[in-house]
Amino acid sequence: MPLLTIENLPGPPVVVPAGATLLAAVQQAGHDWRHACGAKGRCTTCRLDVLAGAEHLTPRTAPELRYLAAGRLLATERLACQVRLPQGEATGRVPEATKLPHVEYVG
């Protein structure tokens, strides 16, 4: 099964079930993750900074392309509520700007 490693969250890599968004997989693994719009791609609070394995992720969605063009997403960032990992492995980090105050991040 595909695996997502989040460098600054404690615990093992997250197993990403077939068809699940990265946000859904992270939440299913027990992590709290910011997503102000309810995972509808209407904000950028669920950003994930992708460090490796971007080639295994699904293509950018229309909301991601819109935010990228507007400068609200960096080239290395994806919206966790939009992107899927159908195969392989990916590594990322929670960006500083979207960290939750009650979560203890590592590194």
Image (spheres, rainbow, N blue to C red):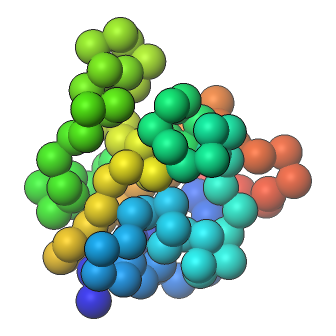
Point 32% across, 53% down: residue = 83
Where is the N terminus found, in terms of image quarters? bottom left
Camera sees residue 48:
no
Point 46% across, 79% down: residue = 13
Q: In x, y percent, where is residue 101? A: 84, 45
Q: In x, y percent, where is residue 79? A: 42, 43
Position of residue 60 relative to residue 63, above or below, is below
**Which residue reaches farthest top?**
70
**Which residue reaches farthest bottom?**
1
Q: Quadrant of residue 107?
A: bottom right
**Which residue reaches farthest right?**
102
Instruction: Tell whether 79 sits left or right of 60.
Output: right
Q: In x, y percent, where is residue 82? A: 37, 49
Instruction: Tell whether 80 sits left or right of 102.
Output: left
Q: Quadrant of residue 95?
A: top right
Position of residue 13 relative to residue 45, above or below, is below
Q: Quadrant of residue 4?
A: bottom left
Instruction: Tell whether 77 sits left or right of 23.
Output: left
Instruction: Tell whether 97 sits left or right of 42.
Output: right
Position of residue 36 relative to residue 93, above or below, is above
